[in-house]
Amino acid sequence: MGKSILIGAILGSLLGWVMGFTVFSGIIVGAIAGGIIFSLLTKRTTTQQDEKNKQEEQTIQLRAEELDIKKERVQTGEVKIHKEVVEEKKTITVPIRRQEMVIEAGDEEQYRIPLKEEEIEIQKHPVKLNDVSISKQEVKEVQQVKATVKKETADVDVDGIVDIAEKDEQQ
């Protein structure tokens, strides 16, 4: 590229001198023109070489399967908790007292007159038996998943006398 810029600068200075411009402005314009011409010529030759290489070289694509793992929450069961009332019959023996008046007559007859007695009154009230705690906890575990995946490899079949240059490409 340097040669093209130098040649362009020399030609530009000569052209500038012949046309009546300053030599310095001719050098600058010539150098720029030389650089542009060099880059256009190199692109053209590079493109032609690339097209030749593309015609000679063919590629095949090798593919491999990969595993995509997704997790999804699914309901596996349900727990319902409720209270149930159970009735139970209880029998309790309670001693009570009462008063009686005893009047005795001479013929040994007795008359009884109750004065006071205790009556049984039943009242019910709730008492706390137990607290039942209800909660959920998350348990983490690791599972191994096994699956078969496919992978394509290049297999070369040679028929006749052919020279093959192998490239070892790691991906």
Image (cartoon, grey):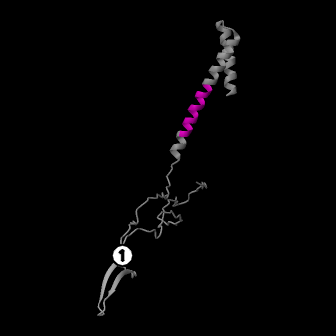
Query: What quarter of the picture does the N terminus occupy?
Result: top right
Q: Identify which residue is drawn at 61% across, 28% down.
A: 39
Q: Position of residue 63 (x, y in %)?
A: 49, 55
* Quadrant for the C terminus in the image: bottom right
Image location (x, y in percent) of residue 22: 69, 8
- Identify the image quadrant of residue 4: top right
The residue at the point 54 percent across, 36 percent down is 48
Q: Observer-nearest residue: 168 or 144?
A: 144
User: Which residue lies at the image location 43% right of the left edge and 59% below the top edge?
Assistant: 73
Judge from the rendering whether residue 113 lies leftward or rightward of residue 41; answer left or right.
left
Q: Residue at x 69, y 15 (%)?
A: 27
As displayed, is residue 50 above or below residue 122?
Answer: above
Q: Which residue is mark 1?
A: 120
Q: Nearer the viewer, residue 79 or 69?
A: 79
Q: Quadrant of residue 92?
A: bottom left
Q: Which residue range is magenta in the image?
A: 37-50
Mark 1 neighbour class, 10 Å CA radius: few under 14, some 14 to 19, many 20 or more: few
